[in-house]
Amino acid sequence: MINLIEGNALEKAESIITAGSVDLIFTDPPYAKEFHYLYEWLAKEAARALKPDGFLIAYVGPYWKDVVMGYFGEHLQYFYDFVLVHGDTSILWPRKIVSGYKSLLCYHQRGEKPLPRMNVLGKFSTSSQDKRFHNWGQSEFEARYYIDCFTEESDLVVDYFLGGGTTAEVCKRLDRNFIGFEIDKATFDSARARLDGALGPDERGRQYNLGIDGQK
């Protein structure tokens, strides 16, 4: 089941996603300060929606990471800060830093002790991000790796900020159930068109050949 929903996740999620039903939230909210409220909402929603052994994995830029961790820590328990090293770099001008990485912050329900289904690389390197379907698109390869590590076939994965549909495409290829929300109609239509051609039987069961830092 791949279910793409056009609309605001903040308004629709609770009526669509049953409490305690989600195995993995894998999502990429916007990073800028004016969108911090989305991370605050996401923390509360994850505490409602995740199974006891489920995980939240969210992309976070390094500039405001302490703020995001504060929101997450109010409602969830910290698991790990996975570091993504990209070939592309950006300059954080207010702090004069040339940054070539971002985090995938991983949390779970308080009081639980879940584990991924396999050993997971703490540092993952990819050659570049994927901007084919969205200006802020992420690499399908890294999404596939972490979704594969943290879920099994038929598990439910949710992305509250669907964007270009990378998480949805990966879940379709890996036989995961998926629910995704996208508020912008043009972006939603693009993601839906992408998913119409996303399934390739030769991609099923693809094996990873990863070095120590996560490269192919």
Image: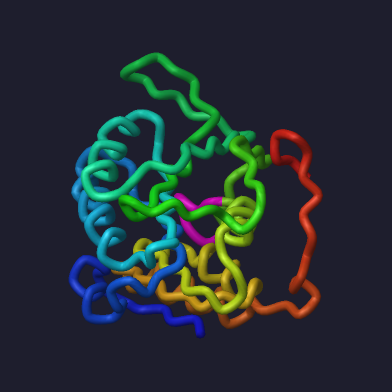
Magenta span includes 6: no
Q: Toward which corner of the image does residue 71 lie, by quadrant? A: top left
The answer to whether residue 123 is left or right of residue 42 is right
Magenta residues, as a range? 133-138
* Whole-percent x, y for residue 93 in the image: 37, 20
In-front residue for pair 58/5? 58
Q: State the residue at coordinates (35%, 65%).
A: 50
Above/below status of 4 relative to 28: below
* Whole-percent x, y for residue 117 in the image: 61, 58
- Dominant secondary structure, magenta: loop
The answer to whether residue 141 is left or right of residue 68 is right
Q: State the residue at coordinates (39%, 48%).
A: 107
Q: State the residue at coordinates (45%, 58%).
A: 26
In-front residue for pair 23/182? 23
Q: In which quarter of the image is the C terminus?
A: top right
* Whole-percent x, y for residue 170 in the image: 60, 67
Q: Toward which corner of the image does residue 84 lie, by quadrant? A: top right
